Amino acid sequence: MNIYEHLQVNEIINCSGKMTPYGSSILEKDVAESMKQASAAYVKMDDLMDKAGEVIAEICQGEAACVCAGASAGIILSVAAIITKGDPYLVEKVPFVETNKKDIIISCGHLVHFGATIHQMIQLGGGRVKEVGTVCKTVEYHYENAIDENTAAILYVKSHHASQTGQLPLAEVVNIAHKHHLPVILDAAAEEDLKTYLSCGCDLVVYSGAKAIGGPTSGFVVGKKNLIQACRKQYGGVARPMKVGKENIAGLIKAIENYNTKSYDYQPKLDYMLQEFNKINGINASLIKDSVRDIYRVKLTLDPIKTNMDAHELDQKLKNGYPVIFTRKYDVSNLNLVFDPRPMRDGDEIIVCKRVKEIIEGI
Ligand SMILES: *Cc1c(COP(=O)(O)O)cnc(C)c1O
């Protein structure tokens, strides 16, 4: 009996994305195998953390890297690293550090909720949130006027969750920060490019290990060596309840090595869905690109007269049927439903097309 059957917890088909509420990522066999091997022996955790940092830093072409529990933990570590500079006395004080130099400047357009708020992560790291600009316009003078003797860093968010309107490009924010000798933290949790942002001059870049990289629940911070050392020091403080086990560190290393060397071809799944969905009367399927990233998905447009239902109803029926199918919920409108091929397992596309056909044809 499979573990989910044993627990009587339903498996789902995920056409939504690499989403935390749906289990983030399915692990490749060799990633799961590394975790199994890691679970079978004792190891000096410091050595494993050092090695993970080396491998990740090399792949991302950064000076150093530090593994953490997820991108949200990475934000906490980064903020705490900058405020404490790794001083052991201050490390034990986070998040209540006795210093005024703890303002973290962030554009209003970057105040995201990714399942929890970014404010809370900044505060857990000992930072004080200093919002600048607006959701539709944040320009140079907003940042410049916010910088004073209490500024610790600027936090920038590269994400489809963030406002894409009128935000100052990352490179310009880096310029402003460096002119004032301030570090820039970049939240790149779900981004696919592991090198660009460091080469752009960011001091610390935070990634989730379970999103684009497809690893187990984990994350990492990569960047300047002294700041990464200060991130590591937080394991003697605020990061203790966010520690990462040897199994997840091993899995993350394997996943990022795979990510760096393999290429993933989602085209066959996209082609299959386009072809099969378009055979259904009243449905038009087309390819769409993500608003920000280089990701392609299938968009279904329903003709409500021919199908006698709208996209919300089809979405509900997929969710409440068997097997349970989750589509990309951000993108559900009255007429459209979106399917993301990246989290789908081989064969899921066949089941999904069959279920949509059954529902629309009322079988
Ligand atoms: C998902 C996400 C996070 C949190 O990542 P975890 O790895 O789940 O902790 C932080 N920031 C952004 C922009 C995200 O998309």
Image (cartoon, rainbow, N blue to C red):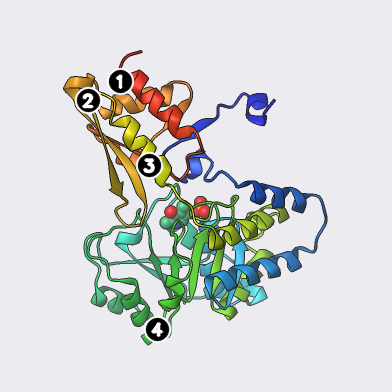
Q: Tell me: residue 2, above or below residue 189.
A: above
Between the residue at mark 4 and the residue at mark 3, the CA separation in whole angstroms equals: 43 Å
Tell whether label 1 touches label 3 (CB within 8 Å). Answer: no
Residue 5, x across and y down, in percent: 64, 25
- Going from N to C along the chain, the mark reached first, 1 or 4, is 4
Q: From the image, tell me which residue sits under label 4.
A: 178
Q: Which mark is residue 270?
A: 3
User: Of marks 2 and 4, which one's residue comes earlier in the chain?
Assistant: 4
Marks 2 and 4 close (CB-CB < 8 Å): no
Where 31 falls versus 201 (above or below)?
above
Q: What residue would you read off at disc 2?
A: 282
Task: Answer whether residue 258 is visible to the viewer in this image.
Answer: yes
Regarding residue 96, the answer to whether it shows in the image is: no
Residue at mark 1 to residue at mark 4: CA–CA distance: 57 Å
In the rendered view, does 199 fall on the left or right side of 166? right
Report the residue at 43% width, 34% height from top: 349
Which residue lies at the image location 45% right of the left edge and 56% below the top edge? 190
Amino acid identity at mark 1: Ile
Q: Is mark 2 within 8 Å of ligand 1?
A: no
The residues bearing labels 2 and 4 have C-alpha atoms spaced at a distance of: 56 Å
Secondary structure of the residue carrying tag 1 is: helix
15 or 329: which is nearer to us? 15
| Rendered view: 82 above or below 336 | below
